[in-house]
Image (spheres, rainbow, N blue to C red):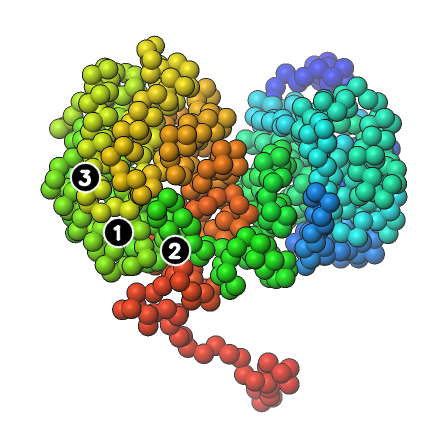
Amino acid sequence: MRDSVDKRLRRGARPATTHPQPPEPTSRPLRVAVIGGGPGGLYAAALLKRLDPTREITLWERNAPDDTFGFGVVLSDETLGGIEHADPQVFAALQRAFVRWDDIDIVHRGTRHTSTGHGFAALGRRGLLEILHERCRSLGVDLRFRSEAPHPARLAEEYDLVIAADGVHSTTREAYAQVFRPHMAGHHCRYIWLAADFAFDAFRFEIAETPYGVMQLHGYPYAADASTVIVEMREEVWRAAGFDELDERESVERCAKIFADALGGRSLKTNNSAWTVFRTVVNERWSHDNVVLLGDAAHTAHFSIGSGTKLAVEDALALAACLRERPDIREALAAYEEERRPVVASTQRAARASLEWFENIGLYLDQLPRRFAFNLLTRSRRVTHDNLRLRDPRFTEAVEREAGCPPGTPPMFTPFRLRGLTLRNRVVVSPMDMYSATDGLPGDFHLVHLGARALGGAGLVMTEMVCVSPQGRITPGCTGLYTVRQADAWRRVTDFVHDRAPGTAIGVQLGHSGRKGSTRLMWEGMDEPLPDGNWPLVAASPLPYKPDGQMPRELTRAQLTDLRHEFAEAARRAARSGFDLLELHCAHGYLLSGFLSPLTNHRTDAYGGSLAKRLRFPLEVFDAVRAVWPAERPMTVRISATDWARGGTSADDAVEIARAFAAHGADAIDVSTGQVVAEERPEYGRSYQTPFADRIRHEVKVPVIAVGAISSWDDVNSLILAGRTDLCALARPHLYDPNWTLHAAAEQNYTGPGATWPAPYRAGSRPPRTGRTDPPAAERTGRGTRGPAG
């Protein structure tokens, strides 16, 4: 029977089972098989052998030892620190081979801007492999080049551990696809990996605006006389320029001509170079029994943040450490994945942001030159305003001057004008439902909640969604503006803000719950129907939000007319209540959002079908509200820029939705996402919704408010200065700290008009003193102190 299995495996057939049975543990040395001889696989082999010389480690690599693809490799100081700690001999060899530099040059429309203080180290990929080959041989690793590895199922039976470092096209991942459950995503750009016979004196980004579209060059030195050169462009540009019809030599010659200035007229070299579409690889699992994925087999991250080799090497470091700490293979592999997955996910989010920035680079070409450079540098959100200010204060100050920031003023504290309203800074307290009203009436809680945040220094404080009718409430605890008494209660809040927090504006968000109404208070069961006392629901179409939720009735034409009137009357009351700004809530699956999404609007009349028809009722409501809202006061609209669900509102749709509202007079678009359908799958992460706002701002040319996991003042400064948004709305940070804005000013040593402490609070405008923790003077001067006697 075993002979027949071996024959099937030698023929390349899939194993009969996806559950390999590793050898029974014995007292013999651990046997490890490594598939793939790239940096990750080699370094894993070397580390495992160094940590325990008795291990038997065999590595298979299908190519020759001196075969390599690509040219230079960049490693971070963090990665190098890990290598130095784990294997000083490899670190010393790398140190001898590295070239180092600090500058990034960005060349756009004939002007070069240089930012310094970044600290890069690179070497040739072939040199890196030679160092790792030599280290593996010296330690006794069995390296088998020009040799296809046996099928992973066979290796899993014969070895205690199988490390699959077989790259983005991993056959191991394919063999166990139903276990690893990989997701592969292609993208919109083509790129080609080339080299030049000279060393750039900085990491260079050069933008070429051609008759076919935008192309970009990424270049960096990896030796005293050599540089990596990557040329990248969108697929449609690549085809329009005719690259799809050129062979390798013709493509390289064409690239050299396009970027002749950057190359000084020199030619480019190839190494099996081909135009490629980057593929992002994500696996739901990285290990299966005694088989584990490492490096590109497990995950990929776009080359524009230089992360591929870095991630593979760091994987090897973590895997070796976990195997040392946990003798049980399965426990060690679980610990390895637990340790690495959040780090990799964070890197992949940064890489995705960088990738998408370059895909959409055409949006930013008309930015002021230094702002364009700052935008490029901060594209992945790993480099921020604050750390760039520390690395290169002269460059950052020049960007701030160009953007109009007064001297000594952080970007977040620059004023911003919307129609007749000037906000003293760019911070917005985002609408947050408090579920603390009785019969729609705001009370003392709302006065304290909103008043405290107004005293806390934000430029604009927004109410929760205020409902236009009793049936439009989400829960029994939601506020309203459908009675005079409610309007009077809101006037009490706005008067407090205007009197006690001068300079802070207060806005009202008007909305109707639609199919998401008649539910419990959030802390009693979010989106769960009331156990009793339900009121009837209405929506664009008769679709419940959840399978067990209440069924709404489809709105008739007469009811649509009534609803427009309810919104307009609520807007009149809002004006009399003294609100400075009004926002129409067309997001998060509530009534107006339900008309916009094809997943929630199945109507066949004039209000359903195409996007233009789905927009019709929300625009009618907007027009009715704008007609009664004072002309000098601004109106904004909150939208969900994506439903995070197949077949729902897309980013392209969001641009057209924003364009339509702007054409009808919206002064800004508040760009949120999701919460439209219960089956959504959001891609959470730091400032994860900002790219949607960024695109709308640049394509529609309308001010935007960015929201979503913006939690630090550094994020706000970075987004504002890069031109990705005009205002930043923060919710949870203001729940944690009502004085978030004032504290941000204090932490940046800012005392200007963009953040004024209320007179009663001025004594708290600096952190309280704490006990001294200075070391003795002798320690600080290095003189030492006398130790204990004896």
- Point out which mark residue 424 bears: 2
Badge 3 or badge 1: first in the primary sequence: 1
Q: Residues within 10 Å of mark 3 (few under 14, many from 20)?
A: many
Asked if residue 109 can be seen in this view, the reply is yes
Badge 3 or badge 2: first in the primary sequence: 2
| Quarter occupied by the N terminus | top right
Q: Which residue is mark 1?
A: 450
Secondary structure category for the residue under label 2: loop
Give x and y (percent) for residue 269. 87, 36
- Point out which mark residue 632 bears: none
| Quarter occupied by the C terminus | bottom right
Give the residue displayed 13% in from the left and 37% down from the top.
483
Alpha carbon distance from label 1 to label 2 = 18 Å
Location of residue 14 (image quadrant)? top right
Alpha carbon distance from label 3 to label 2 = 26 Å
Q: Kindly give the residue lying farthest to the top in the view shown.
A: 604
Q: Which of these two is toward me, 566 or 159?
A: 566
Q: Which residue is mark 3?
A: 573
Q: Amino acid at mark 2?
A: Arg
Give x and y (percent) for residue 85. 69, 57
Q: Residues within 10 Å of mark 2 (few under 14, many from 20)?
A: many
Give the residue displayed 58% in from the left and 36% down from the top.
363
